Structures are given as structure tokens and as C-alpha cells.
Amino acid sequence: MTQISFNIRPVQSKADRVAFVDLPFRLYADDPNWVPPLKDEVHGLLTPGKNPWFGHGEAQLFLAERAGQVVGRISAHIDHLALTQPAEQGMGPGTGNWGLFEAEDAEVAQALIATAEDWLRAKGMTRALGPLSISIWDEPGLLVKGFDHPPTVMMGHNAAAYQGWIEAAGYRFAKSLRTWDVDISNGFPELVQRIVSAGERNARIRIRPVSKARFDEEAALILGILNDAWSDNWGFVPLTDAEIGYVGKKLKPLVYEDLIMIAEYDGEPVAFMLVLPDINEKLVSFGGTLLPFNWAKLLWWLRRPQVRTMRVPLMGVVKRLQSSRMASQLAFMMIEYIRRNATAHYGASRGEIGWILDDNQGMNAIAEAIDSHINKDYWLYDKAL
């Protein structure tokens, strides 16, 4: 009989939670492409009362320990809003999740995944879908392609070995979430420019920047379009009003009016594009903390960031216009207007679009039309329990 050389236990104390958050800092200490997250942000993600996801979700964190040292971690969680979604859209009744997965070796990995599965079974779940850290709106998926360069803001990074360990636990591929890399320094192909020019001659179309003076109103407008635009997408779970407020507050320091566009058609807001300067380029040297003086460096950077990369995390067109020529035209116009501002005002030369679902034909076609290429691929897996 194989002797188990470690134990797994639930996170119960503040010290346990600190150990949970700290583990990746040891495991990735020698990985040049891992970006240390701000620890306070991770604690906020995991804390009921701070993260409004817990208003409709429940989670249990677990630690693996060997000889007094933490060697692995995992979360098991259930989103009760996700349980109400149609099963054909990826979530649905009986589907629980796990994520925030880190392990020192394959043995620890197998035991952690089994522990998360046991917790989900005890809660009545019949299927596990993961990794999700901690919802589809946070850092979904396991990186399987693109280990050779750091992730952009709000995207994850993990060890390449994890794919084999997860598949060895009986998980099968469920969905691919991809990011696309694009050179934005020299403009887009002539066909795209012609489409943009035609839109500029259409008096019914108006592309406008957001107003930070009306931030709460603009954030609610954008996320309202998002909930409509993405409602038929695989994995979709609607954002609640509390989550919309929470996301808006978190993103406000990274909001620049000329990097977020709203498209209006006949005076009605029908599409948006949100672009963020890649704050990871600054955070990579902070070691996960704003103390003692990193807060000052960050505040100075936020005044007018100069970055290589801009990320497009969110983009949406209201459902009634999707699959129309108008949807593509509005998308190209917003992309081009923001490209001009990103290069002129922030020194950017590269864009990253995504994630985009592998079967989202409209968005993948737009990415291809501007000469993008897939630079990272994140997979979600599932397993019957």
C-alpha cells in the first residue's frame, strides 16, 4: 500500500487563508512569465462580504500540507445562479466547480481534485467543471498554450504539467477560451479601414467615449449590454447588480475615457468595447504588495500609463443586432478608434483580445480580419461525479 506523505484539510483560519494565497509565490518564484497578483485583491476575491459572488455562491478552500509545508491548494464551489442556466450552455443543474488550483506534484494534484469532487458530491452535484477561479468572470480555464510570455491583466498563468495531471484525474476537454495577439502600431488592413470609413459617413451611427464623470451610470449601461450580448454564450452566468457595482469599483482606477467606447445607433446604446492598459507590466515587480512604496509607484503610473500592451477583456453587441453587418461595422469602428488613442496617448504597440470562445464565430472572424493570431489558449474540463 502506498503511504500518503501529505494531508489535505479545509481552510478554517486567517492563517490558513494567508497560506492559501501565498502558495503560488513559492511555486512560481523561478517562473519569469508568472505575474504576482496583489495579495489584497486575492483575499478580496475569496472573502464573503467583500466579493458579492458569495451572494449566490458558496465555496470551500482546501490546503495540502507535507512535513509542515503547504504543497497544494484548491477551491470547490457552487454558483447557484449557474445551476439555473440551460445545461446546453455549459453550466446548468448539478454542475459544481473547482479552481484556484496549485500543486507541487502529481500525487498532490490527484488528491486535491478528489477532495474537491467529494465536497461537490456531498452538496448534491453530479458534474464538475473546472478550473474556474472563482467564476466565469474571474480567471476561467487552464493555460495549455502560451507559456512563453506573461499573461495580461485579469488573465491566469499555471504550470504546464497541470494539464496532464487534470486529464489523469479523468477530466475531458469541455471548452477552449482563446486570446488573440495583434500588432496595433501601424493600423489595420485596408478592408477594415473601408468599413470604418463607411460607418463614419452613416449619420445613424455614433461612437463615443465613456464619461468618467458619470461612471456609475456608464458602468451600469455597459454591463447591461454585456448581460444581453453574452446571454446565449457557453458558460454565461448573469452578473447581479451587486457584482456590477463591485466590478465597476475594481476597474475604475484602470478606466480611461478614450479607451472605452459605446456605440449608439439611432441614439440607442447598442454596443461597447472596454480596453484596459496592461497593469501586469507594472505589477510584475511589486511582489504582490503595495507596501512600502509600491502604492506611490502605482498611483504615479495610473496618472497616464505608458504600456506596450492593451487588453480587450469585454466587448458586446446587443443580441438583436448580432450576426448582422451592423454588428461587425460597429466593432471595427470601436476597435479602430481605440487603437488610435492607445498608440497616440499610451505608447501601446500590441493588443490582446479575449478571451474568446472557440465557437464564437463572429468574434473570431473579427479577430482574424485585423490580422490577429491566437497567442494563448485556456481549456475548461468536465467530469461526471
Image (cartoon, rainbow, N blue to C red):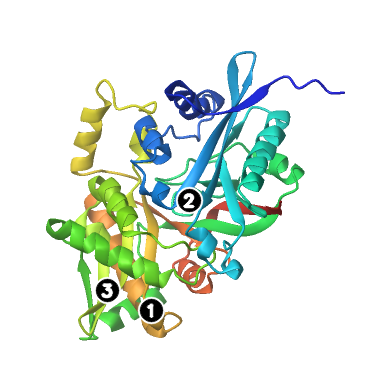
Determine whether the residue tagged by mark 3 lies in a helix, strand or loop: strand
**70 is higher (above) or lower (below) than 135:** above
Q: Residue 17: tell me if it is visible.
A: yes
Q: Which residue is mark 1?
A: 327
Disc 1 secondary structure class: helix
Mark 1 against mark 2, which lies toward the viewer?
2
Q: Amino acid at mark 2?
A: Ser
Q: Are marks 3 and 1 in contact (CB under 8 Å)?
A: no
Residue 23: percent from left, percent from top: 52, 26
Q: Which mark is residue 135?
A: 2
Return the x and y of residue 86 as percentages of the image width and height: 56, 69
Which tag, 3 or 2, sits closer to the chain's start? 2
How far separated are the C-alphas under marks 3 and 1?
A: 10 Å
Where is 103 relative to 57, above or below? above
Left or right: 111, with 141 as reference point: right
- Relative placement, left or right, of 129 versus 196 is right
Sort mark 2 into few (<14), some (14-19) or many (20+) by Cα contacts within 10 Å: many
Mark-to-mark CA distance, 3 and 2? 28 Å
**Identity of the residue drawn at 12% across and 57% down:** 213
Which of the pair 119/359 is nearer the observer?
Answer: 119
The residue pinned by badge 3 equals: 263
Residue 203 occupies which quadrant of the picture?
Answer: bottom left
How crowded pointer 3 is (Cα within 10 Å; few <14, some 14-19, many 20+) is rated as: many
Say which label, 3 or 1, has the lower sequence index: 3
Specify whether 125 is left or right of 210. right
Q: Position of residue 166 (x, y in %)?
A: 69, 43
| Of pointers 1 and 2, the one earlier in the residue sequence | 2
